Image (spheres, grey):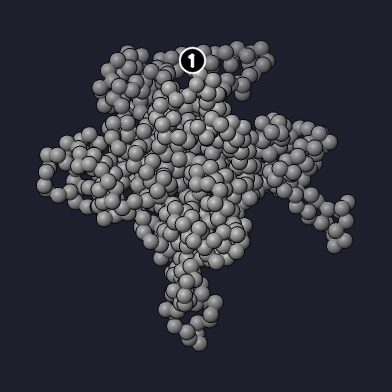
Amino acid sequence: MPQHEDELAVLLLRDIYGDITATVVDTLLKYGRLTIQLISRYSKLSVSTIQRVLVPLVQNRFVLYWIDEKADGDNATYVASTRNMYNIARSGMFVSYVLDRFPDTAGAPDIVKNLLLYGHFRVSDYLAAQSASQAAVSKSAVTLLLQHKLLTTLRSHEFNPESDLYMRIFKRRLAAIPRSKTVSEAKREVQAHAEATEEFNVLKRIHDDVNDGLIAATNGSSNTIKRLHSLTDASPSKTVDEVAVLALNHDKFVVLMRAQILVQLVSKRIGTVTATVYRQVLDCMEPRLFRCVDNTDKAINVTSLEILRSLDPDLDLGRVIALGSKNKKRSRSSSSRASKRQKRSHGTDDSASESDESVESNNISDHDNSHQYDLNKDDDDDDDHLNDGTANNSRIEQLNVHLALLSCNHNLPFMKRVGNKGGGEWTIDFDTLSARVRELEYDKLITQKQGAIACRLLRIIRDKGRIDEKQLARIALLPPKDIRAQLTALHEIGCLDLQEVPRGTDRAPSRTYYLWYHKPKSAYALMTQAVVKTMVRCYERILEERGRRPTIMTKLLREDVRRDEANMLTPAEREELRRIRGIEERFTAHMAKLDKLVLIFRDM
């Protein structure tokens, strides 16, 4: 496990749960899988103290446990889950997403906050702690979040490490395959691994069922149920099963965060209106997207009619699209031919030089013509289309223009057209798109740290694969002595690797080729560690600022001060508190930006 992720996890737990909890987690991160007795020996804490500490850790799945069925006695072992502890840093983001997506749903933010605090709860226990009216509203809010897969049911095997679960399945499958003289032991293991992998994947995707945790709504008090569901936009035909145990679905939140990153990229590259269209495309695909990595083998398609139905009818799709008329095209082409003939008569021919705008418009028009778009209308027709936003034919044509803009850039393929059903059938290759987004973000970081020339060399090496220094200098149009320092700097930060290819058996340096190449996976992993290290320093700075002012921080722990800070604090203390919170807000915002990089390089 990377060192800096462990440091961040310990810092987060020390700030939230205290020093004893951080000591237990730090012991597990240092020594790996341990029993309670071994944790007590290494941490110098009593067994009873460790048992009390492990309760909230296991409840939040910060620590996973495993019990060997064949062993005797108390043989439970515990393993720290750094990935689950890292999600603490995204707690504010989870609440913010729920507030943005369900602003009119009462109780939804409180449900997310309770799950962030307690890890999971049984629905009946959560509703029993509230009044009758509050319980009805909370039940409808839980149903809505469960239907949108922001909540998921929790099963007992999810408290166990995945590696141990897989080995248990593998051993059971291997024991079920009979031994024979015709089948070798290696073939038995290969067959057992294949069967265990299939069963393990089914176990991981058990929550993908749309009705997971939901039951049919009862007929009693139908008017009240319909009224509550109308307030929360939940389906009145389904309601949450009160026996179910629920937890936050972190994979679904990562899908929403990825969608936000892609929409922001479209807004920067193309425009805000096209970004709004792309947001609606992602919203149409969202019910069938359960996770970013290893989602499903089947492509998810959406038609133009589906996008148009869910699109805001007040959104003006045509005001940002400039379509030339046929007459203007003819006059432009005729004037172009006349100018070319005139240049030939004078002995010059600049027919090969064209503006970037003409090339781009021709590419878009060729792409549209390949899909049989009739985008070349008369000027009068264009004006009618812009004024009449209720005409479906005109609006779907304008929508298809935006979708064509998203799909025509092969360097950054936001979408891809796969058919003509429903006015046009579209899909998104998230693997290719995510890989390209990672490349763009990595190039941006390299440019900020090493300069534009270093980023230029990286792009050439990425395009060519493996290349030596002389050929690289010739392609980059730079002398070898100028690029040598750049290549060394990129090698030091893990961006580039060097391969030696000897021309003889003596492996003499003078008779050896040195090829530079880029390994994206290892480079992104090293960049992720550097980003997490920066997050650790930011959080340490927040804790340091709090430690410098122990008096006011201790006073803020009092309940009466929390309820009425304006009257319980002096003007000097309020000014000092405002300064502290301003520093925390700046560093917290910086950590959110760094977390976006972690999402791009690791989770997408």
- What residue sits 70% from the left and 45% below the top? 494
159 vs 580, left or right, is: left
Q: How many marks?
A: 1
When the figure is inspected, residue 184 is found, relative to residue 423, above or below; the finding is: below
Q: Is residue 41 visible?
A: yes
Q: Which residue is mark 1?
A: 332
Q: Decide if residue 362 is in sight here.
A: no
How dense is the environment of label 1, judged by Cα within 10 Å: few (below 14), some, or many (20 and up)?
few
Residue at position x 42%, y 59% in the image: 158
Q: Amino acid at mark 1?
A: Arg
Name the residue located 34 percent from the left edge and 39 percent from the top edge: 110
Q: Position of residue 170 (x, y in %)?
A: 47, 71
- Is residue 272 left or right of 490 when viewed as pictured? left
The x and y percentages for residue 585 are 52, 29
Against 272, residue 598 (above or below) is below
Image point 63% across, 16% down: which residue? 344
Picture coordinates of residue 498 (x, y %)? 75, 49
Quadrant holding the N terminus: bottom right
